[in-house]
Image: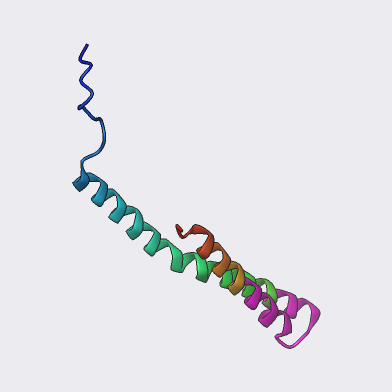
Amino acid sequence: MDNNSNKTDSVPPAGQKGKGFGTQFGMAMELPFVLFGAIAVGGLLGYFLDHWLHTKFIFLFIFGGLGFFAGLRDILRRLPG
């Protein structure tokens, strides 16, 4: 067995840089879909409630706004820091 204390099994710095870039790029591509998805789900739910209750877009704005804030919350939760 080689008990050399100078030997390390870590990833070289170039590999760490590429891994970080890939993770950041993936997150940058995902976050707009997270925000739009939350707004779309809230807006659709509000639209169908308005249609069912025969109201004039009040639930669309309420649930669309809630979807916006839920999307922002999810984005801020996913960001490192």
Residue 16 placement (x, y as % from top left): 26, 46
For residue 12, side relative to residue 69 (left or right): left
Residue 75 placement (x, y as % from top left): 51, 64
For residue 9, side relative to residue 67 (left or right): left
Residue that sits furthest to the bottom in the current view: 56
Residue depicted at x 29% and y 49%: 19
Q: Return the residue nearer the eye: 80 or 19.
A: 80
Q: Return the residue nearer the eye: 48 or 80.
A: 80
* Snapshot quadrant of residue 30: bottom left
Residue depicted at x 38% and y 63%: 29
Residue depicted at x 35% and y 53%: 23
Please identify the quadrant where the N terminus is shown: top left
Q: Return the residue nearer the eye: 30 or 58.
A: 30
Q: Return the residue nearer the eye: 22 or 4.
A: 4
* Snapshot quadrant of residue 63: bottom right
Residue depicted at x 67% and y 82%: 61
Residue 21 placement (x, y as % from top left): 28, 56
Structure colour scheme: rainbow
Is residue 5 in the magenta section?
no
* Snapshot quadrant of residue 7: top left
Is residue 66 in the magenta section?
yes
Residue that sits furthest to the front in the current view: 5
Residue 13 placement (x, y as % from top left): 21, 45
Residue range highlighted in magenta: 47-67
